[in-house]
Image (cartoon, rainbow, N blue to C red):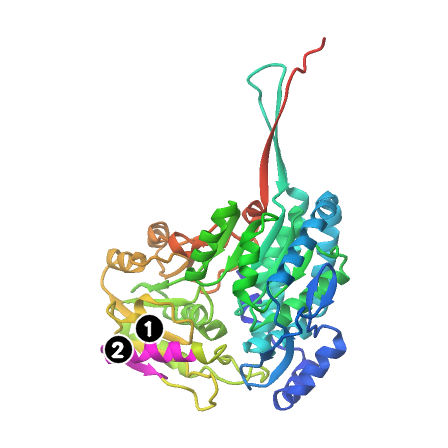
Amino acid sequence: MAMCRAGLLGSRLPHPFRILCRQMSTEPRVAVDRLRQSGLLRTQGLIGGKWIDAYDGKTIPVHNPATGDVIANVPFMGRNEAINAISSAHETFTSWSKLTANERSKRLRKWYDLIISHKEDLALLITLEQGKPLKESLGEVNYGASFIEFFAEEAKRIYGDIIPPTIDDRRLLVLKQPVGVVGAITPWNFPLAMITRKVGPALASGCTAVVKPSEYTPLTALAAAELALQAGISPGALNIVFGNAPDIGDSLLESTKVRKITFTGSTAVGKKLMAGSASTVKKISLELGGNAPCIVFDDADLDVAVKGTLAAKFRNSGQTCVCANRILVQEGIYDKFASAFAKAVQALEVGNGLIETTVQGPLINEAALEKVESLVKDATGKGADVLVGGRRHSLGRTFYEPTVLGNVNNEMLISSQEVFGPVARLLRFKTEEEAIQIANDTNAGLAAYIFTRSMPRSWRVSEALEYGLVGVNEGLISTEVAPFGGFKQSGLGREGSKYGIDEYLEIKYVCLGNLKEV
């Protein structure tokens, strides 16, 4: 758990970097100049190992959500670029998959080393285009790099099997082989880690990839791809295209050369990708939306529960799929928890992520801000109490005050919808059975959290919750060595861990017959 907490919350910034960040927070161009000098500010797509513009010359701006400044203009690519990226990945698949597992492992390890050696610049880039505090960005770099390191090691452990034959002159073998070209569609909230969690196992298993990052945060993906090329990842094994999302997505779905789709994002888009994959019967893995319950029982350690819930809810300003969406508090501890939690939330400092003391950055865009406002307005109109916050922040733009709503009930939209913002809502419950019923009363099933001192209860409730991930007395549970994925409409398949690489493999049965001596 130590890696989880350090990797996802971040750690203290190195002293020289802190000084530079103070300057960059008031002079944004200093940050951009630093990234240019590092060679990591790439502003073109990547196809076949070559950096290219959109074929028609169209571009789109990438904005800093904290300031509104344009960081860079990047290509607005579409169907033609996507088709060529797919062809490049398909042509490279034969040579990449034929490399020994040991050789692929060495190149992935080199990629990991380069990411770590450039972690401060990558963190800076994440903060500039996504908005999260720099300490969290450093945490994401470490977390994202951990998937490359882990799957570099797993590349050498893709084992087949030998089955005892039913006939004495036969031998039955099981082989695991790479599925082929992978289409990976990734979100903006973790612009590095969501790529490495998919591309790491893909490349380790011998697949090649076409990645479509979010148009809000393409620069981190391009920087990671630059380091991959430096590490010796074969040109064409990793391709990056972005711009016209529907056209690129349709190209990936329609192509018979693409044998797998992996996606992290909304449930609505995931369902469309699932339907679109049917025509070519692709393998598909989906990591979709959540509606995570956080259950605080009367017997919980109050300090542990407050700290854990704070981390589970407010990381990345509430913009994660595993954020605590519904905080269920047993009536015996409700008042104490609500008071302590509201006090902790009120102390969260909001600001530009480049300022060292900032722990809450902006929301990604105006649409995200308006959604949060709408859900809070609906809840307060139906009787919810605003314990802290509840409005746009005085900093303006897309900053929103860290908010706690009390006495929320299931009639409010905020109880059933994923808010994706810095709003915590507290619901009372009486019994363990009631808490489980409320927690499971949703189509989502990604993450859930429990706070209790009772070991028997932790077992009972963990097993009863219909969720793919359960944290007990801990709000930060993601790690590269454990499987990540959801139940119900929160997705299909698993990412990370030894289970994650199976998503990129086909199983082949080989029967060797007529082995008797003549």
Residue displayed at 40% across by 86% down: 392
Quadrant containing the C terminus in the rendered view:
top right
Image vertical order of residue 281 relative to residue 393, above or below? above
- Location of residue 233 in the rendering, given as x and y in whole percent from the top left corner: 73, 56
Say which quarter of the image contains residue 4.
bottom right
203 is within the stretch colored magenta: no
Image vertical order of residue 397 relative to residue 214, above or below? below
Residue 425's mark? Answer: 1
Q: Which residues are magenta?
A: 369-390
Q: How many marks?
A: 2
Drawn side of residue 330 relative to residue 89, left or right: left
Q: Amino acid at mark 1?
A: Arg
Q: State if disc 1 and disc 2 touch (CB < 8 Å).
A: yes
Residue with the mark numbered 2: 384
Say which quarter of the image contains residue 61.
bottom right
> Sequence order check: which comes first, mark 2 or mark 1?
2
Residue displayed at 37% across by 63% down: 291
- Location of residue 176 in the rendering, given as x and y in whole percent from the top left corner: 62, 38
Name the residue nearer the viewer: 117 or 257. 257
Q: Amino acid at mark 2?
A: Ala
